[in-house]
Amino acid sequence: MKKHISLILALVLVLALAGCGGGKSKSITIAVPNDTTNEARALMLLESLGYIKLKEGAGITATKLDIVENPHNIEINEIEAAQLPNVLKDVDYAVINSNYALDGGLNPAKDSLGIEGSFSAYGNILCVKQGRENEPVIRALLAALESKQVADYIASKYDGAVISVVDAPTDGYDASIDYAALNGAKVSVAATPTPHAEILNDVVKDILAAKGITLDVKEFTDYVQPNNVVESGEIDANYFQHVPYLDDFNAQNGTHVVSIGAVHVEPMGLYGGKQSSLDALK
């Protein structure tokens, strides 16, 4: 009799360790960006997909500590945003910014298993140091980015992975600017490679060159140095971030970088790593 009881107890223990009789014992790992605003954005995407619930009011500053319901036993791994495509194979899923997804050979519109449905707060912006907003060469740069040429390029090249947010695209020029006075001028822009540097090099450079303005694009692969070099005056402008990230960066670093216009959005997506479908989250 004692032998039978021991066998039963052993079986119960094995079943408990295997996660039978209730919730999942094995966690699902999802990697997300480790900077404040993009982590919150990733968590809000997971919430919108129904996989977690965040504390009420957490909003665009949410962290994994604000998760109040986690029925799928998701383990959130915070990773530097640019590295997410590289670690995708090591986690079940990852939430990746579209620029880094594109760099990693992923198409947000085709390869993501879930994608943002609202982009209003996350338009990618052209930024300068406060006080330089109205310099003619800066306004000429903004006008070129707000052109129909750029909007058309975005639509044809990125197939929905990048979306223009310019309401009324122009011919690329600002009628209030004396372009003759800018002939021979140079403007430098810090940008991440895809899609920002591509847009600048493939379209904006030619628009400005037609007026004798030289565009110098400096590529960066991180989210810190582009703001630092604009703050220091080493580079005139940058094009890589959205307003929530910029606001947090200024608050944390005492910098004075300001947005002068939104150009496009990059929907953040959930991608499969070890998992090829969302079945593990059902």
Image: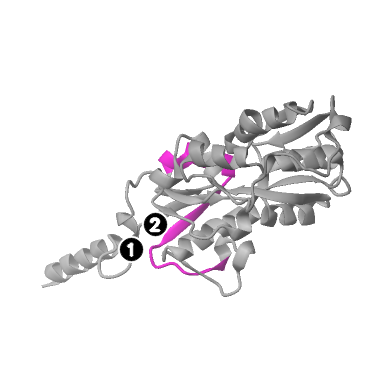
Give the magenta part as a residue range: 66-90
Question: The N terminus lies in which quarter of the figure?
Answer: bottom left
Q: Nearest the camera: 192 or 89?
A: 192
Q: Is residue 22 above or below residue 29?
A: below
- 85 part of magenta stretch: yes
Q: Quadrant of the C terminus?
A: bottom left
Residue topped by disc 2: 27
In the drawing, does residue 272 fall left or right of residue 43? left
Residue that sits furthest to the bottom in the current view: 56
The residue under the point 55% across, 37% down is: 153
Compared with 215, 255 (above or below) is below
Decide: is 145 above or below 1: above
Q: What residue type is labelled 1?
A: Lys
Residue name at image x 33 percent, y 67 percent: 23
- The residue indicated by pointer 1 is 24
- List x then y, in percent, for residue 148: 61, 42
